[in-house]
Amino acid sequence: MNLFYALNEGYNILKLNQKNSYKIDAELLLCESLNISREKLILNLNQKISILMFNNFLSKIKRRKENEPIAYITKKKEFWKNEFYVNKDVLVPRPETEHLVEESLNIISKNQKKRLLEIGIGSGCLITSVLKERKYCSAIGIDCCSRALKIAKYNAKLHHINNRIKILKTDVDNFNSGKYDLILSNPPYIEKHQLKYLGVSDYEPLKALDGGIDGIEILVKVILKASQLLKINGKLIIEIGSNQKYKVFKILKKHNFYINKTIKDFSKYDRCIVSTKIS
């Protein structure tokens, strides 16, 4: 049995289960099983594979067939310019959240020393990505989930920024420490009744997705807290649901924020808002 045979088995199983990404999924899972790069796999399809390795690969294919995200199977996910450890205790980082990193880096120049806060740190991919590129900045990351905090701390250490970040267990309502130049947040913003229609909600932590009845329950808390903790002219960068822009604009203005801009995601939905605390 060779890698070509194994790969085709994976292709066929996933294709029969209507996975549009069956080719890349099977290739990634075989690479993970063998601990090799995708390039090496493609160049060595005639190489033999042991029964043990083949069965290991098929067990991963079965998990993917049942809609488990690739990131949870491989325990890793690319985000911005880095690879992060993830598991079922945190959301899988999404490409659209990279807009928050990009906007943060546009605001902070390379030689500036700024104090940052992330509300709802999760895996830590967002704040870690910013700190890796802004060497003089420091940060605090908060989350109410102990298991998520362990992953954020692991990723901070993995990427050698753990000496510039404090990661604390607290919910947004009870955090009242310090003043910040920039606050980032990708809070839960899915309407509660929509959760059951999400393709991966059986695997990802619902608490990190559930934005309450109208989807903006946590967003309101984040904006209120940011109005208390940001310095004058400090920036708030938040991710929002695709239909929430005008509701969030209203809340921001109520709490003395000037709206700088809205950024669309790769599907052309409004996804990120940059605002400034003006008083």
Image (cartoon, helix red, strand yellow):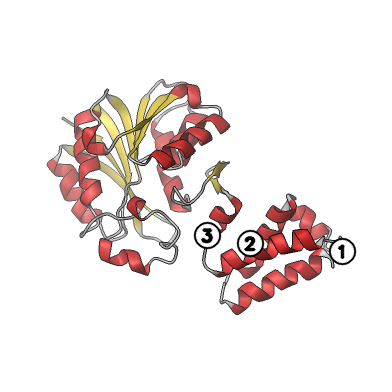
Q: Which residue corresponds to mark 2?
A: 60
Direction from residue 164 to residue 188 in the image, left or right: left
Type of residue at label 2? Lys
The residue drawn where x is 57% and y is 49% is: 75
Residue that protrudes farthest toward the left in the picture = 254
Q: Nearer the viewer, residue 63 or 131?
A: 63
Asked whether residue 75 is in view, the answer is yes
Q: Name the spot of residue 262 as percent of width and height, x first.
A: 31, 49
Residue that badge 1 annotates: 46
Marks 1 and 2 close (CB-CB < 8 Å): no
Residue reaching furthest to the front:
52
Q: Which residue is mark 3?
A: 69
- Quarter occupied by the N terminus: bottom right
Q: Is 178 situated left or right of 22 in this image?
A: left
Q: Amino acid at mark 3?
A: Pro
Residue 163: image x %, image y %?
Answer: 48, 21
| Marks 2 and 3, how far apart at CA | 11 Å
SS at mark 3?
A: loop
Q: Nearer the viewer, mark 2 or mark 3?
A: 2
Q: Is residue 93 above or below residue 118?
A: below
Work out whether 20 lies above or below 100. below
Q: Nearer the observer, disc 1 or disc 2?
A: 2
Q: Residue at x 30, y 66 (%)?
A: 194
Few, some or many residues within 10 Å of mark 2 (<14, 14–19, 20+): many
The disc, 2 or 3, on the residue closer to the chain's N-terminal end is 2
The residue lying at 74 percent from left, 72 percent from top is 8
Residue count near mark 3 (Cα–Cα under 10 Å), binned few <14, some 14–19, many ≥20:
many
Is tag 1's residue or tag 2's residue first in the polypeptide sequence? 1
Q: Quadrant of residue 72?
A: bottom right
